[in-house]
Amino acid sequence: MNKIPFSPPLINEDIENQVLDSLRSGWITSGPKVQRLENDIKKYLNVENCICVNSWTSGAMVVLKWFGIGPGDEVIIPAYTYAATALAAMNLGATVVMVDVDDNCLMDVNKLAAAITPKTKAIMPVDIAGLPVNYQKIKAVVDANSQEFTASSKAQQLFNRPLIIADAAHSFGAKNNGKLGNHDADITIYSFHAVKNLTTAEGGAICFNESLFSEPIDRQIRLHCLNGQTKDAMSKTNSGNWKYDIVLQGLKANMPDICAAIGIEQLKIYNKTLERRKEVFQQYFDFFSKCDWATPPASVVDHLESSYHLYMLRIKNATEEERDAIMTKVIANGVSVNVHFTPLPLLTFFKESGYSIEHYPNAHANFLNEISLPIYPQLTDEDVDQVCATIAAAVKEVLNLD
């Protein structure tokens, strides 16, 4: 019986050689490989622009800061997400307003309008497990409830409504009406962390809706990524070009070439790895859809298709304690599993900040019996069968099922 890790990165010889090329070139910070990765992502997703950054969190902070968000402003997010979604706004002094989620763990559009106030400056839904939010519906709610919006920066004057940012940390490669890329949010921010479908070890990317992109906006956001410095490292190496200026209070968010090198090669095989993820997802679905005790996750909702980043299985009627006992048995039998996510109001920092899980009953209910299963291209069909059998045996033992 194999030991099955939860989410190992896919590293092949081509990736190793691309990284070695960076190391041997003498150029390992932001440079030609970052530019190449940005261009490759633009082509792959068919988006007007892409700015690679050193993490999703940095990218979100850069975008919020560029938009002029700070103390006194509100940013709406779902209660069911990783902490970075909230902290990106809170680290700039903004107030986070949480809303509950639906049965797919996505922001409940029906509860969004009540959360919007004259202080709302951004809405940041989260694509969970790879399944995208319906941003067309989000935008309709925002347009109908933002009459009292007051722009307090030049960027905000472009919209005269809250900015709609897609937290797409899970959804690189998801499809909207059969097309790659999120073209309905104003700005989409991806994560390329080590466990993501496409990785640069650490990193992320900011992508623009076509109607938003312009060269001046691109320059402004790039300035925010590099401490407000007017010249990057490559520009400064040109003869006689060392002088630079600091023109705004920026952050340090640029991706280095040594990370971009991994992403360049990962993207070359991404369609193949994405297809294998879909096959693993379907194999799980075929098994668990026949189990009375299981609630399999959705991969397609309306015109939106997942990137198959996570397989978030829910065990019907299991308590949190029973879920944890099932996981303990599964892990003891060599299969690594996880939980995505602990709702923010259950975490100490957010509880102490005044958030209560009582206000987010669906987020709490989704969490109590959720188990995330391994899903990645290196898994064989036999590995997936082993995961299914191990989960089923543990559930039947803990819940005393026949």
Image (cartoon, helix red, strand yellow):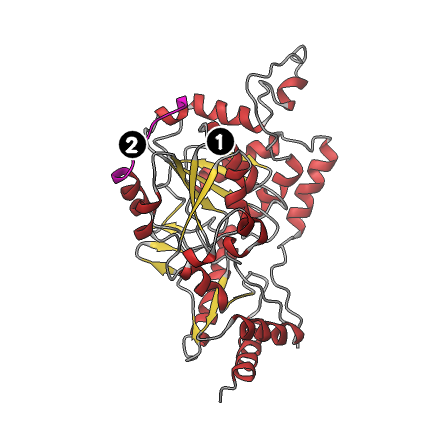
Mark drawn on residue 71: 1
Check if residue 119 falls in the magenta segment.
Answer: no
Q: Position of residue 264 (x, y in %)?
A: 58, 42
Which residue is at the far top? 240
Tell me the residue at 63%/55% (across/down): 9
Which residue is at the far left? 144
- Compared with 222, 97 (above or below) is below
- Compared with 2, 190 (above or below) is above
- Compared with 397, 366 (above or below) is above
Considering depth in this image, is 281 or 169 the residue closer to the camera? 169
Under mark 1, the amino acid is Pro
Under mark 2, the amino acid is Glu
**Residue labelled with disc 2:** 148
The reply to whether discs 2 and 1 touch (Cβ–Cβ < 8 Å) is no
Q: Earlier in the sequence, mark 2 or mark 1?
A: 1
- Compared with 221, 139 (above or below) is below
Q: Quadrant of residue 234?
A: top right
Considering depth in this image, is 106 or 209 the residue closer to the camera? 106
Helix, strand or loop at disc 1? loop
Q: Position of residue 392 (x, y in %)?
A: 52, 79
Q: Quadrant of residue 150?
A: top left
Magenta range: 143-154
Residue 269, visible in the rendered structure: no
